Image: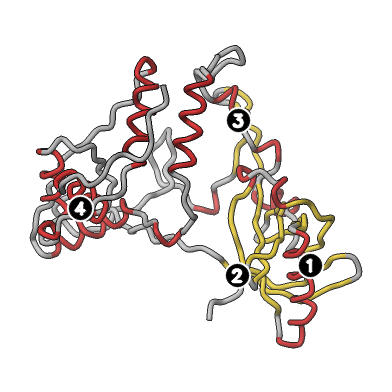
Amino acid sequence: MARAMWSGTLSFGLVTVPVALYSATEDHAVRFRQLQRGTSDRVRNQRVNERTGEEVPYADVVKGYELSEGEYVVIEPHELDDLAPGRSRTIEIIGFVELGQVEPILFDKTYYLGPKGKEYTKVYALLREALARTGKAGIAKFSMRGREYLTAVHAEGDTLTLHTMHFADEVRDPHQEVDNLPEADVTVQERELKAAEQLVEMLAMDWDPKAYRDEYEDRVRELVEAKVEGKEIVRPESTVAATNVVDLMDALNRSMAAAGVGAKPADPGLDGLTKAQLYEKASELKIPHRSTMTRDELQQAVGQATAPAKGKRRLKAVS
């Protein structure tokens, strides 16, 4: 079992339950060491004085807040320690809000909350069921590892989940960060909007998070394994062109037509081809494809292009 990273009390009103906090996610990114080329010698980062080039002992490092170029307010480490919040022993729920009211952009990290002992499972289940039935989340603040966190606690399956959240002033205004956002007077043709809505509905699907993988990390591991075995990996490049505004209606119509045709069975003869060979075949047939596509997606796309057409398109293009 995983080790709890924090333990204390979760309280709402006069009801309290001892709980432990566990990490809900983990990073599977491939980790690399920095080496000097041609050797297996590790390269380490050092604290170096920018002016003299000499290494600075950790005990001589202080923090500086820059007022202007070259002018700093110096803060000693112990001065920050005096301001840091102590470790909270309680996650005190301030109030409850509709979970749908909390914008996804506010969520940061996710943790599981579990009862600290079997004797506390009943009160834990009470809060979990109450949150599940009402669809609400408890808003709370607590401190851990020298930081204060704003959190949301809600029911997810048979578990209470805690999300640390960004404070409102940490969220950037998109109108100050993003160039070329559409102005309020940008008009969209009704027929284009209806076509886009129809396309969205046609491509609607059930959410299954297990259907998705970090394919970049898969390729990195594949590269590492190939190098261990002395192989060389060559990947064809593929680019996807942006939709031209002039051809927007045509692109919508063609998208709906493609989505309206039943999926053709993949060619069984493609089973023996590698992913790279399927890329080459897709390029030869001029089939739209992306470097991020899985092998199964590539096989399906090539199979649909090479299988004989069966039946007619079920939907008519929007005119």
The image's mark for residue 130 is 1
- The residue singled out by tag 4 in the image is 299
**Disc 3 vs disc 2: which is toward the camera?**
2
Secondary structure under badge 2?
Answer: strand
Cα distance, mark 1 to mark 3?
49 Å
**Circle 3 crowding by C-alpha within 10 Å: few under 14, some 14–19, many from 20:** few
Q: Residue 295, image x and y in percent? A: 23, 54
Secondary structure under badge 3?
Answer: strand
* Residue plotted at (51% across, 53% down): 58
N-term-proximal mark, 3 vs 2: 2
Q: Amino acid at mark 4?
A: Gln
**Disc 2 vs disc 1: which is toward the camera?**
1
Cα distance, mark 3 to mark 2?
37 Å
Residue positioned most to the bottom: 119
Q: Which of the image's four quarters has the C terminus?
A: top left
- The residue singled out by tag 3 in the image is 66
Cα distance, mark 3 to mark 4?
56 Å
Q: Are marks 2 and 1 in contact (CB under 8 Å)?
A: no
Residue 148 is at least partly visible in this image: no
226 sits to left or right of 13:
left
N-term-proximal mark, 4 vs 2: 2
Seen from the viewer's position, the closer of residues 188 and 194 is 194
Q: Amino acid at mark 3?
A: Glu
- The residue singled out by tag 2 in the image is 22
Cα distance, mark 4 to mark 2?
40 Å
**Disc 4 vs disc 2: which is toward the camera?**
4
Q: Amino acid at mark 1?
A: Ala
* Residue plotted at (12% across, 47% down): 234
N-term-proximal mark, 3 vs 4: 3
N-term-proximal mark, 2 vs 1: 2
Q: Quadrant of residue 117?
A: bottom right
